[in-house]
C-alpha cells in the first residue's frame, strides 16, 4: 500500500448551535493514500461535501485531527491554510467557475499570472495542461464556445496548473451525459496514476463507481462500515 496522503481521526463538524444545530460530520476516521482515486458516495445531506471541504482546508473541523501530506491542517492559521491550499490543493468545481471573458488559455494560466509568473511562462504551462485534457486545439476559445464536458475539462486543467498533490472534485459528472462523464473520469483516473498525487471525488453518480480505486459511503455524517463483498471497498 502506498503512503498515506490524508489521515483523519475523530473529525467532526457542526453548523449552528442548540436545537437548530446540524451535525454534518461525526467522528470520522479515514485514511486516503497517495496514487489513488478515492470516492466518497452518499445521498444529499449525508455530509460528503462538508468532508471534502475539511480535506481541502476550506473549513476547520470542530474536533479531531486532519493531516494532509504530513501537514496537520487543523492547526494552521487562516493565512497558513490559504498558503497550503495554494500550494497543495487543486479544486474542481461542479459549476466550473470559469471566467467568461477569458480564453481557455487565459482561464488555465490565471492562477499563475496572479502569482506573478511571466505571461509567456504561464501560457506554456497552460498549454501542457490543455494537452493533458485533450483541449490543446481550443486554447483561443471562450467558455461560451465550449460544451459542458469541455468546460469541465478546462476546469480540471486549471486545477492542475500549480501541480497540486491533492486534487478534489465535488460531483464532476452529475450534469454530464454518460459519454462526456466517461471522458472526464478517464482524465481524473490518469491524474491519479501519479503516485505523488491523490484524487478525491465526492459523488452520488453510480455510473462512475468503476473508476475508483477505493470508495466509502457516507450516511448521516458518518462513514459506513466497509462492505467489500459489494465492491464498496476495493483495496
Image (cartoon, rainbow, N blue to C red):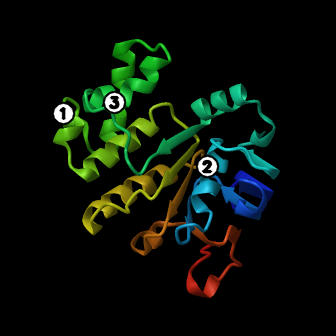
Answer left or right for 115 relative to 99.
Answer: right
Task: Locate residue 206, reporting x and y percent.
Answer: 44, 75
Say what secondary structure mark 1 lies in.
loop
Residues under labels 2 and 3: Cα distance? 23 Å
Among numbered discs 2 and 3, the one appearing first in the sequence: 2
Residue that mark 3 sits on: 107
Query: Residue at left 32%, top 62%?
Result: 181
Label 1 belongs to which residue? 141
Using the image, tell me which numbered label, if any, was put on residue 53.
2
Question: Along the line of sight, which residue is nearer the eye, 80 or 132?
Answer: 80
The reply to whether the C-beta atoms of the residues labelled 1 and 2 are less than 8 Å apart is no
Q: Residue furthest bottom?
A: 229
Q: Work out which quarter of the rendered image holds the C terminus and state it.
A: bottom right
**Mark 3 falls on what kind of element?**
helix
Asked whether residue 27 appears in the rendered view, the answer is yes
C-alpha span from label 1 to label 2: 31 Å
Q: Residues within 10 Å of mark 3 (few under 14, many from 20)?
A: many
Task: Name the residue located 68 percent from the left edge and 76 percent from the top edge.
Answer: 224
- Indicate which label's residue lies in the foreground, 2 or 3: 2
Closer to the chain start, of discs 1 and 2, is 2
Q: Nearer the viewer, mark 1 or mark 2?
A: 2
SS class, disc 2? helix
**In the rendered view, does 169 fall on the left or right side of 58?**
left
Q: Residue furthest front?
A: 19
Within-10-Å neighbours for mark 1: few <14, some 14–19, many 20+ = some
**Visible residue check, residue 193:** no
Marking on residue 76: none
Quarter of the image for the N terminus: give it. bottom right
Relative horizontal placement of residue 137, taking residue 124 as reference (left or right): left
Identify the residue at horizontal 38%, vertical 39% (top origin).
97
Q: Is residue 14 left or right of residue 179?
A: right
227 above or below 64? Answer: below
Amino acid at each position: 500500500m502506498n503512503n498515506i496522503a490524508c489521515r483523519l481521526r475523530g473529525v467532526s463538524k457542526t453548523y449552528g448551535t442548540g436545537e437548530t444545530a446540524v451535525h454534518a460530520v461525526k467522528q470520522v476516521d479515514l485514511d486516503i493514500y497517495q496514487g489513488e482515486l478515492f470516492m466518497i458516495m452518499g445521498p444529499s445531506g449525508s455530509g460528503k461535501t462538508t468532508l471534502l471541504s475539511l480535506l481541502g482546508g476550506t473549513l476547520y473541523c470542530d474536533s479531531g485531527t486532519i493531516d494532509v501530506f504530513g501537514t496537520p491542517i487543523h492547526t494552521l492559521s487562516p493565512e497558513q491554510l490559504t498558503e497550503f491550499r495554494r500550494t497543495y490543493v487543486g479544486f474542481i468545481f461542479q459549476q466550473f467557475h470559469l471566467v467568461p471573458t477569458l480564453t481557455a488559455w487565459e482561464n488555465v494560466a490565471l492562477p499563475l499570472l496572479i502569482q506573478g509568473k511571466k505571461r509567456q511562462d504561464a501560457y506554456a504551462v497552460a498549454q501542457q495542461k490543455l494537452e493533458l485534457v485533450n483541449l490543446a486545439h481550443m486554447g483561443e476559445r471562450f467558455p461560451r464556445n465550449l460544451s459542458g464536458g469541455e468546460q469541465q475539462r478546462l476546469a480540471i486543467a486549471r486545477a492542475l496548473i500549480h501541480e497540486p498533490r491533492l486534487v478534489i472534485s465535488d460531483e464532476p459528472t452529475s450534469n454530464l451525459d454518460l459519454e462526456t462523464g466517461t471522458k472526464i473520469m478517464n482524465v481524473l483516473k490518469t491524474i491519479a496514476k501519479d503516485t505523488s498525487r491523490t484524487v478525491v471525488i465526492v459523488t452520488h453518480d453510480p455510473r462512475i463507481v468503476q473508476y475508483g480505486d477505493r470508495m466509502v459511503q457516507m450516511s448521516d455524517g458518518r462513514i459506513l462500515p466497509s462492505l467489500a463483498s459489494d465492491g464498496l471497498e476495493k483495496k
